[in-house]
Image: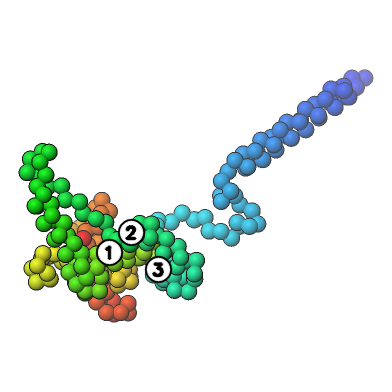
C-alpha cells in the first residue's frame, strides 16, 4: 500500500501562518511610514486628486497665463484691501519716504577727501532726482519712481524702464522712461532658428537665455504690431 500523504505538523503550520502575517503587517507599516514622509502637497488623495501634477516649462505656462495673472493681480490691488496693504508694505519696507541716497566718496588722494567735488556731485544728484528731470514724462521724482518700481514689480512680477540718453531731455543728457509692462507683446513667440534669436512672451533672448531686447505693442493687443527696444 502507498504511504499516507504527509500532513505536516499542525504546530509548525500555525507558526508559519503567524510569521507570514507578521511579515505582511511589518510591510504595511513600512509603506505607511514612507507615505507619511512624503511632501503633503505631493500626496494623492480625495482632496488632491483634481490637482494638476503635469510638469511644464515655466515659459509654456506663462505663454497662456501671464496676461490673466497680471490683470487679476491689478484687480486685487484695486478691490481687495489685503492685497493693496501688502503692496503698501513692500513699497514702505523697500523704499520708504525717500529714494536711495547717493554718498559721494571722491578723494584728491587716499585719505584726502575732495569736499568740493563731493558737494557738487550730491547737489547734481539731488537736482537730477526732481520731477521733470529724472523721468521724461515729468510725472515722477526719483523717489516716486523707486516706489512705483517696487510696487509694480511685486504686483506684476516685472517692471520696464527704458534708459534715455539724449542731451535734449535735461542738462544731464540722461533720463528714464516708464513703459507699462502691460504693453509687452506676450503674444509674440518664436523658437531660435539660424541667425534668429528666440522670443519668449515678447522677450528676445540669446542662446544662454539672457534678455537682449523686448517687443512692445504699438497698438492694442489685437493689432499684432510690436516695436523692438534693446535691453
Q: Quadrant of the N terminus?
A: top right
Q: Quadrant of residue 120?
A: bottom left
Residue 36, image x, y percentages = 63, 42
Colour scheme in use: rainbow
Location of mark 1 (residue): 143
Q: Are marks 1 and 2 in contact (CB under 8 Å)?
A: yes
Q: Is residue 220 visible in the rendered structure shown here?
A: yes
Of the residues under marks 2 and 3, which one precedes in the sequence? 3
Location of mark 3 (residue): 70
Q: Secondary structure at mark 3?
A: helix
Q: Residues within 10 Å of mark 1 (few under 14, many from 20)?
A: some
In the displayed structure, 178 sits above or below 15; it is below
Location of mark 2 (residue): 95
Of the residues under marks 1 and 3, which one precedes in the sequence? 3
Between the C-alphas of marks 1 and 3, the distance is 24 Å
Residue 219, image x, y percentages = 27, 79
Residue located 62% across and 39% down the image = 34
Amino acid at each position: 500500500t502507498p504511504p499516507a500523504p504527509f500532513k505536516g505538523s499542525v504546530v509548525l503550520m500555525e507558526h508559519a501562518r503567524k510569521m507570514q502575517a507578521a511579515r505582511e503587517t511589518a510591510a504595511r507599516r513600512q509603506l505607511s511610514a514612507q507615505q507619511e514622509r512624503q511632501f503633503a502637497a505631493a500626496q494623492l488623495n480625495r482632496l488632491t486628486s483634481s490637482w494638476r501634477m503635469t510638469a511644464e516649462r515655466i515659459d509654456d505656462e506663462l505663454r497662456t497665463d501671464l496676461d490673466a495673472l497680471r490683470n487679476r493681480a491689478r484687480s486685487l490691488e484695486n478691490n481687495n484691501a489685503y492685497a493693496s496693504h501688502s503692496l503698501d508694505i513692500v513699497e514702505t519696507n523697500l523704499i520708504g519716504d525717500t529714494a536711495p541716497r547717493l554718498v559721494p566718496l571722491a578723494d584728491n588722494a587716499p585719505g584726502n577727501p575732495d569736499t568740493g567735488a563731493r558737494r557738487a556731485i550730491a547737489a547734481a544728484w539731488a537736482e537730477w532726482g526732481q520731477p521733470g528731470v529724472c523721468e521724461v514724462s515729468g510725472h515722477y521724482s526719483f523717489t516716486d519712481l523707486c516706489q512705483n518700481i517696487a510696487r509694480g514689480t511685486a504686483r506684476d512680477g516685472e517692471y520696464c524702464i527704458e534708459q534715455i540718453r539724449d542731451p535734449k531731455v535735461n542738462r544731464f543728457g540722461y533720463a528714464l522712461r516708464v513703459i507699462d509692462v502691460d504693453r509687452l507683446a506676450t503674444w509674440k513667440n518664436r523658437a531660435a532658428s539660424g541667425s534668429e534669436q528666440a522670443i519668449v512672451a515678447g522677450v528676445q533672448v540669446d542662446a544662454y537665455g539672457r534678455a537682449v531686447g523686448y517687443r512692445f505693442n504699438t497698438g492694442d493687443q489685437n493689432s499684432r504690431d510690436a516695436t523692438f527696444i534693446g535691453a
